[in-house]
Image: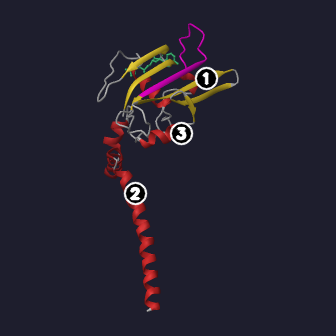
Amino acid sequence: MFIKEIEFVNFKSFGRRVKIPFYEGFTAISGPNGSGKSNIIDGILFALGLSGSKTMRAEKLTDLIFNDAKSKQPEFAQVTITFDNSDRKAPVEADEFEISRKIKQTKSGYYSYFYFNGKAVSLTEVHELLGKAGVTPEGYNVVMQGDISQITAKMSPTERRKIIDEIAGVSEFDEKKQKSLAELDIVKEQIEKIDIIVEEVK
Ligand code: ATP
């Protein structure tokens, strides 16, 4: 599974509609300082609801709506991410699917909506779907500026090991192993009880 395209509408520096294609494997984006490269990462965090533990660079959500101070600020911003799902990593029976988020400003405040293939869904549903494909708010699917120095210089070897396990998918098996061992203990206890009863009956 990989991101195939991101569409921005009035999001941060992307006034109006801007589509950015991505390719399988590796896509590098270069540009002058302040041209909006990091805004693309903010768009990914925003659209996929991953900003719980990673920080989008905006004081409030409405700062994400395009504002050039020359014209009236648009009422909404939207980011749509199209995933290539030909490997079926996500539990969606289609070669591609879309996750989108819109923020709408009104006089009384703002509203935020998530969509899966154009249908309104909750943030929990987005997280459940992405979680099955290994994309989680706590994960390292999006590596922020500063994460690398944090990992290499500030973390203990045990903390670093945890991250490597998580990226390699080992932690998922550790959890399953712990669960199975706990179940095994219960079964062993039951066998011991049954053995005692069998002995008594004899
Ligand atoms: P650098 O290479 O310096 O890290 P960058 O290419 O990553 O830069 P960003 O930080 O993504 O650039 O973009 C910063 C630009 O986005 C600034 O020029 C800022 O004015 C603009 N910007 C941020 N929010 C908005 C907004 N709501 N409306 C319009 N422009 C915005």
Give the percent coordinates (x, y) of residue 196: 45, 86
Identify the secondary structure beneath mark 1. Answer: strand
Give the quadrant of ligand 1.
top left
Comes first in the chain, label 1 or label 2: 1
Name which residue lies at 56% across and 25% down. 102
Name which residue lies at 34% across and 16% down. 31
Q: What residue is pinned by disc 2?
A: 176
Q: Nearer the viewer, residue 59 or 189?
A: 189
Left or right of 114, for residue 87: left
Q: What residue is pinned by disc 1?
A: 104
Q: Which residues are magenta?
A: 65-82
Q: Is residue 57 above or below residue 50?
A: above
Comes first in the chain, label 2 or label 3: 3
Identify the secondary structure beneath mark 2. Answer: helix
Regarding residue 52, the answer to whether it shows in the image is no
Name which residue type carries label 1: Lys
Give the percent coordinates (x, y) of residue 39: 44, 23
What distance separates the C-alpha of mark 2 from that of mark 3?
23 Å
Left or right of 132, for residue 164: left
Main SS of residues in magenta: loop
What distance separates the C-alpha of mark 3 from that of mark 1?
20 Å
